[in-house]
Amino acid sequence: MPVEPLAVSQLTLSTDPASLGFVTTADLEPVEGIVGQDRAVEAVDFALAIRRHGFNVYVQGPEGSGRTTLLRGATARASEADPVPDDWIYVHRFSDPGRPRAMRLPAGRGRRFRDAMARLVADLRVALPAAFESDDYRARREAVEGTARKRRDDELEALAAQAAQVKVALVRTPVGVGLAMTDGDEVLAPEAFKRLPESEQEQRRADMVRLEEELEAVLRRVPTWEKEGRDRLAELEQALVRATVAVHLSVVRETVADLPEVLGHLQAVEEDLVGHANEFSAAASSEGRSSLGLRALGADPAATLRRYEVNLLVDRTDLTGAPVVIEPNPTYAYLLGRIEYVAQMGALMTDFSHIRAGALHRANGGYLILDARRLLLEPFAWDGLKRALRSGELRIESIGRALTLVDTVSLEPDPIPLDVKIALVGERRLYDLLMALDPEFPELFKVAADVDDRVERGPDSEQLYARIAAAMARRDGLRPLEAPAVARLIEHAARGAGDRHRLSNHMRSLNDLLAEADHLAGAGGRDLIADVDVDAAIEARRRRVGRRRELLLEAIARGTLLVRTSGESIGQVNGLAVHQLGDEAFGWPTRITARARLGSGEVVDIEREVELGGPIHSKGVLILSGYLGGRYAAGGPLSLQASIGFEQSYSGVEGDSASLAELCALLSAIGEIPLSQSIALTGSIDQHGNVQPIGGVNDKVEGFFDACLALEPRDDQGVIIPVSNLDDLMLRRDVVAAAEAGRFRVWAVRTVDEALELLTGLAASEVHRAVETRLGTLARLAREASAPPSDAADGRSAALEASSAESAQA
């Protein structure tokens, strides 16, 4: 019994707007998220909850399926229950400036400590110079300095008095202090000295030698007195600085009294300030000194004071739970932190204040979401992340210095303990590659969450879909949707899923379609988005990417691309193909032809012979050959040489969805039975003649429908599809309307026999009998061709007579 065309209700599954239970989405409570992902949500929640090494999660699924939305919701829920992690700061290490010190402070305390140290530095900029300029300090300094001068002057005056008794004077010159012989109040000239008696000259020479020795002894003691003065002056300065610093540091110490590590750092700050008291005094007393009142050894005073400040690396002041960080640009520096440099005198310099946090620092104690593909594309980022997860600590290192590409002053900051959950978002193929090629990946990412791009379609999921659409509309400031518009969205989602009983989870496509429908509603002056706006948006999208489809239809209409949609032909059939263009696809008919002749049982796949056929297509042709051998040559070889080809095919052919059409064309050529050209068919077969499902069934049916419209619409046109594709049917409304009017049909078949009956109008047994008869004739011809010459002529005559009689009987 011939297969009946499908009922209109089988061609699509509509959603009744009344069943949704609302008038517009303004009546709904919006919900953020994606539909029906219990398994993926369960996996993510488990990964976020377990506190064990390596239980990070890889969320896999197609782009736009809501993977990141799912993660945002899960991490937001988890972070609310988690405590706020600590702040982290870097400070100057006075014992080793090249290794900045990392310190942990309770959440919010880091900012307060930073501000307190900034106020301390600002206060010291004023207080220290003011202390050195005070009258009390000046008086005490002058007293210390005066003591040293007085001792020197007293010694010199005593020596001068002693010298005067022997007529020697103490003379002060620009180069120092000396002795000179005198004669009264005048210095004794050399000529006058020579006129003195010899005995007096001897005496005076002896007095000069003795006095010079005493003068040298006095002058040798002067540096000691000056050093003692400087030491007392340094003690005075240190006492002044210590007292000044202690007053201001006491305020800071009160804010961190419960933090021993910070108190230890403040003690080091105090000792460093006191140890550089001479720098403060020199800066204060020098002319043109800076307003900072502090001068380091050849350095900028501001740089000297900056070593007492705080680099607040991670600030948790405004957090109410664990941090959730999404890093859109996971470079090595943005992920693991970096050290910045400044140019000074032609050299690149840096210090602890130029250390910058990475995404791992900001997410430490919480959750970090990364795009797996972008992470793997960044040099060194993937290895850096794995190294940090393995070691459990964050080290800020310069890639350029590690590779010896940069020879400059750098730092080795203290590592910071790492406690973070990493969530990678990527495609399934990328997950499989990482599992296969990176042995560290399964150790560090033990949990996989698979986001399904399709969910079950039912009243609950349709209601949830409507609430998600309502949330998108409110979030983006779009118009509310009428119930028929939501029903149309659901039907479109079912078509996108490729299954009428499922809905596509591609949230980005839904969001884009809503935006387009809202624009069209606004252009039409409507306050609500109607179903006509959704239909118009779908059609506009189809038209935007429809240039190639229209060119193919134009070629079919002009006869450039030879396709027949009426009449009958032997060995020719309309197959169906799908062209994918981004997210859009369209189908079109392609002519498949077959020829059969005497041969050795070989079925030639022309596409494979010219290397245009892919391996799956070649597999389909080999299965076809298996069907022929099992059905018609169970007791011996086939005496057949057949060829199958796609006409006007100039690019690659892949897939086995044409194997049903190829088999029907081949059987038509062998049995010389004409096939209807008003019917196209699609489906793959197994070696027993069962028809198997194929992909893109909606696009294929619609492609042949469009070709029929482009050529000559008739009432006997239609498409044969596998029965197993019935649940995939979500045809366009114009195709459904044509089927309802009887102008187009769709048949669903289970076997090759059912397809043959529809294409030939004959019973399948008649088709097989004709094929068997022709194969028998070819077999006899093959036997006679191999017989001795004396018997060949008689055999050929008998075979030809029998063949003529069988053809007449058929």
Image: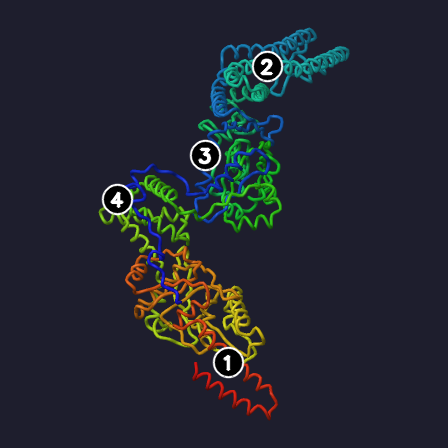
User: Label 2 sits on what residue type?
Assistant: Leu
Q: How is the image coloured?
A: rainbow
Residue at 22% from the left image edge and 47% from the top image edge: 525
796 left or right, relative to 518: right
Q: Position of residue 397 (x, y in %)?
A: 58, 38
Q: Which mark is residue 528?
A: 4
Image coordinates for residue 680, horizontal then vertical, percent: 39, 67
Q: Are marks 4 and 3 in contact (CB under 8 Å)?
A: no
Q: Is residue 759 above or below residue 193?
A: below
Instruction: State which tag comes first along the sequence, 2 or 4.
Output: 2
- Label disc, if present, on residue 597 of the rendered structure: 1
Looking at the picture, does residue 103 appear above or below residue 203? below
User: For the residue marked with disc 1, what is the amino acid?
Assistant: Arg
* Disc 2: CA contacts within 10 A as few (<14), some (14-19) or many (>=20): some
Q: Residues within 10 Å of mark 1 (few under 14, many from 20)?
A: some
Report the amino acid beneath label 3.
Ala
Q: Residues within 10 Å of mark 4 (few under 14, many from 20)?
A: many
Q: Earlier in the sequence, mark 4 or mark 3?
A: 3
SS at badge 3? helix
In 3D space, how far apart are the residues under numbered discs 2 and 3 (Cα atoms)?
Answer: 62 Å
At label 4, which amino acid type do we have? Answer: Leu
Q: Position of residue 520 (x, y in %)?
A: 27, 50
Label 2 and label 4: CA atoms lie apart by: 86 Å
Q: Residue at label 2?
A: 233
User: As rendered, which of 799 and 640 lies closer to the eye?
Assistant: 799
- Which mark, residue 76? 3
